[in-house]
Image (cartoon, grey):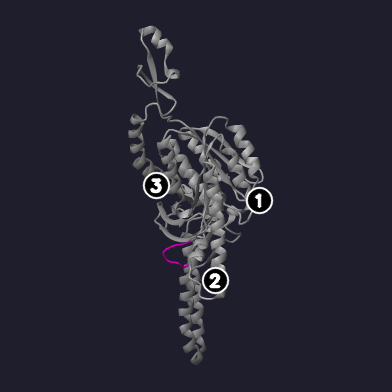
Amino acid sequence: MNLASPLTPERVEALASSRSRVGIAFGSRFFLLLVCGLVWMGPAFLDARFLYGILIWDVLLLTAWAYDLSRLPRPQQLSLARQWEAPAALSVQSTVTLLLNNGGGAGLYAEIVDDVPPALRAEVPQIELTAPPRQIGSATYSIIPAERGDSQVEDAYVRYQSPWRLAERWTRVPLRQIVRVYPNIEEAKRHAFYMTRSRQIEVDKRYARLKGAGREFESLREYRDGDELRNICWSATARRGKLVSKTFQVERSQAIWLVVDCGRLMRARVGSISKLDAAVNTALTLSEAMLLAGDRVGLLAYGRNIQKRILPGRGSYHLRQMMEGLVDVHEEAGEADHLRALGVLLSSQKRRSLVVWLTDLSETAMTPEVVDSAMRLMPQHLVLFAVIGQPDLAQAASRDPENAEAMFQAAAAQEVMHRRELVLARLREHGALALDVDSAVLSSTLIAAYLDVKQRN
């Protein structure tokens, strides 16, 4: 499925207009030639008539500047287009192309400043290009978005000169547009296709050996010793005059909920992104893998209130809906209301399903509320509880202390990790699949766990 085309921001194009009331200036070569005219100052000390040489030189230079200015196209003869080569995705480098259409009769050398917000690029891009007469010149720059959501790209500013470089004009091109930054699409594609293709073949082979393991009707066959009486198809038995049994297969279309915690603990940074960004990228990766496997996927993102709820569905349109929903998920400064999320989930999903809960644990001696909420789900649902780990915590716990302060830090880190493991062990005792996973391998680990669950039915 090609997700790139509809997600790519639209191309925008507009005519240039004067940047200011004047909008003209002297070029770099004008000042260089002006300095060259000062060579007349030496002879002028001996004979004042050489000062006329300086005056004549300046007049000729100003005349050349005026002529060069007249050759430059008017701002209304220029148009600039901003073209996006790929969707804007979190932490993914993509390319933006600027196309300058020169409608004048002279070639141009242009410097363009595109007003891109820091959410898309750390520095404002300043690019140079040349545009032959009545042709289009192009140049590119790259962006690496640092935040999800909508970002507003402002106007572009163009300063252009002729090949003489004596005069220049300043123009502004209204290219304001809203650019939507999606979760890491490349990571979702890479993990989903690779993991699903490598494991789904094995899963499909097992379906044939798991007749009767599921409850999805597969076929009819003659009754055999050991078949359960509840599996006898009485209507087919009446037609054929002998006992006929139903055979079942592992269900291929299950309901799966992705639950994303957006509370304060998810604001912690792991590398260049937050834990919430890592969870959102993983949720998108899981969505694509699960939909490819034929399951129905839903989303519940929550903080103090429910930020986004999408009921389980399937198909490419539903994947697009999941992606758009994940864009709007944002961090909150307060503690998330896990019990409210539990109530919404239980009311939204009555039948048994797989719940993948992406969260983090607070460092407390008490049982975290999110763990209590997950345990209340277990009698009715299968819970895959994923805690996003902190790499620096593991490093501090394994580091050999060199002094007393380092020893206390290592002991504190080990205690925190021990508490987390005790909490996860308690979840496993109650039947949950509990994992403490580094954000770098979060997507691949959860896809592997999901495929294992699906393989074991």
* Marked residue nearer the N-terminal end (1 or 2): 1
Which region of the structure is painted magenta? Answer: 160-166
According to the picture, the residue beneath numbered tag 1 turns out to be: 335
Q: Nearer the viewer, mark 3 or mark 2?
A: 2
Q: Is residue 164 magenta?
A: yes
Q: Is residue 223 magenta?
A: no
Q: Nearer the viewer, residue 305 or 12?
A: 305
According to the picture, the residue beneath numbered tag 2 turns out to be: 407
Q: Amino acid type of disc 2?
A: Met
Q: Amino acid type of disc 1?
A: Glu
Quarter of the image with the C terminus is top left
Residue 119 against residue 197 in the figure, above or below: below
Q: Nearer the viewer, mark 1 or mark 2?
A: 2
Measured from the top left, where is residue 421 in percent x and y?
A: 53, 54
Residue 455 against residue 445 in the figure, above or below: above
- How would you rate the neighbour count of disc 1 (Cα within 10 Å): few for under 14, some for 14-19, many for 20 or more? some
Residue furthest bottom as drawn: 46
Element at label 1: loop
According to the picture, the residue beneath numbered tag 3 turns out to be: 190
Say if residue 174 shows up in the picture. no
